Image (cartoon, helix red, strand yellow):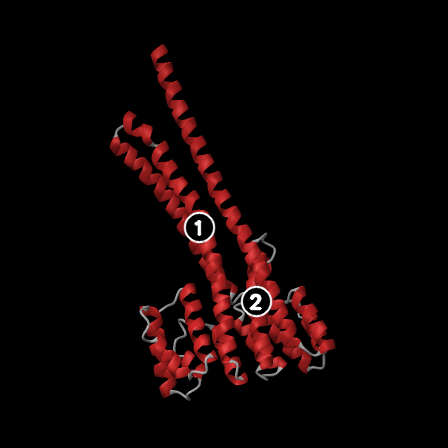
């Protein structure tokens, strides 16, 4: 029982629309449970069942589907329910997952043609082998090339998955990732968005700044932010002012440090976090667009290298044939 990014966007949008119209939480879920989408209806029914057996709160009901509702969703739902702004929270989550779904679609559309071109090149450039050595040799050559291609893709995909999972528990690894061009910026913008969104909602819900830092760190999906939140809490409790604690924690980007310093003067840390979240969202989109633009170029380079290799291979065979004829 899982939802894609687009399904989560639609799911939270339906919740926000119903709640904004003044409909009870259970009534909105009952309507979602009758949707044609099997995945969304299953999630809605699971939440409904938990809502009927638990303490009746939305947050407790959402905890029944941890494979769908992650730490970010749960923290924001808890804050929204406590502050009476669950409709606004669901709308923010819908926009957040809509942003991720849009970025994913843009990435896939950018790499679709170069991936097709790479497959086409392997099939066409190996065609002379079918005439010179037979179809069996041609199929074996194509199969070997595609096998290598898919093996490399699988290794890269597995590596990315393992790194992303390790980033949730390894702060030192995230420090290293920050120095990786483009990828480090994308990662920081994503976790910065999550941290800022949750912190602003927690403060609005009256959870307190320190409790908000703790929950925001947990929901960020970043071990580094979680460690930083723990350091901030310890320093503030020992008497350090919040701006100094955030700066000396050594885990948060400048945007968050400056927002806390500004909030020290105007007393609006929640509003500052909303502003910072918007900045991180825009940065995430722009850098992901840059990555989507560079990724096809890498594939084009692979195509050029493969074409050059095949040309050299055909030329060597041609000159070897000529040499045999001359001898």
Instruction: Determine if residue 135 is in view.
Output: yes
Residue pictured at 25% horizontal, 32% vertical = 135
Query: Where does the C terminus fall, quadrant-wise?
Result: top left
Q: Position of residue 120 (x, y in %)?
A: 37, 38
Q: Residues within 10 Å of mark 1 (few under 14, many from 20)?
A: few
Q: Residue drawn 50% across and 67% down? A: 95
Q: Position of residue 62 (x, y in %)?
A: 42, 78
Q: Pick whichever of labels 2 and 1 is earlier in the sequence.
A: 1
Q: Secondary structure at mark 1?
A: helix
Q: Are marks 2 and 1 in contact (CB under 8 Å)?
A: no
The residue identified by callout 2 is 193
Q: Quadrant of residue 23?
A: bottom left
The disc label shown at residue 93, or none: none
- Identified at 36% across, 87% down, the residue is 53
Q: Nearer the viewer, mark 2 or mark 1?
A: 1
**151 relative to 258, above or below:** above
Percent of width and height locating residue 129: 31, 29
Cα–Cα gap, marks 2 and 1:
25 Å
Q: Quadrant of residue 224?
A: bottom right
Q: Label 1, on which residue?
A: 109
In this view, the residue in front, 92 or 59, is 92
Residue 280 x %, y %: 59, 63
Q: In the rendered image, is residue 174 in sight?
A: no
């Amino acid at each position: 029982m899982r939802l894609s990014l687009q399904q989560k966007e639609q799911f939270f949008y339906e919740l926000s629309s119903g709640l904004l119209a003044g409909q009870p939480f259970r009534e909105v879920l009952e309507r979602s449970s009758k949707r044609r989408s099997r995945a969304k209806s299953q999630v809605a029914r699971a939440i409904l069942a938990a809502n009927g057996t638990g303490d009746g709160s939305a947050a407790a009901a959402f905890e029944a589907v941890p494979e769908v509702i992650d730490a970010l969703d749960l923290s924001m739902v808890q804050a929204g329910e406590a502050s009476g702004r669950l409709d606004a929270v669901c709308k923010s989550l819908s926009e957040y997952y809509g942003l991720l779904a849009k970025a994913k679609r843009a990435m896939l559309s950018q790499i679709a043609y170069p991936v097709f071109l790479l497959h086409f090149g392997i099939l066409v450039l190996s065609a002379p082998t079918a005439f010179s050595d037979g179809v069996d040799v041609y199929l074996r050559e194509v199969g070997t090339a595609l096998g290598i291609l898919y093996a490399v893709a699988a290794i890269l995909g597995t590596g990315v998955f393992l790194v992303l999972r390790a980033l949730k528990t390894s702060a030192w690894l995230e420090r290293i990732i920050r120095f990786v061009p483009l990828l480090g910026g994308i990662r920081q913008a994503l976790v910065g968005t999550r941290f800022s969104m949750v912190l602003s909602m927690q403060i609005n819900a009256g959870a307190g700044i320190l409790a908000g830092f703790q929950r925001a760190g947990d929901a960020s999906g970043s071990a580094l932010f979680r460690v930083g939140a723990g350091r901030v809490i310890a320093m503030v409790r020992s008497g350090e002012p919040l701006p100094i604690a955030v700066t000396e924690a050594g885990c948060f980007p400048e945007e968050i440090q400056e927002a806390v310093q500004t909030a020290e003067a105007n007393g609006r840390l929640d509003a500052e976090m909303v502003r910072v979240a918007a900045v991180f969202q825009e940065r995430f989109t722009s850098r992901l667009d840059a990555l989507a633009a560079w990724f096809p170029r890498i594939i084009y380079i692979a195509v050029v290298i493969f074409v050059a290799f095949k040309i050299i291979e055909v030329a060597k065979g041609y000159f070897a044939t000529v040499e045999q004829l001359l001898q």
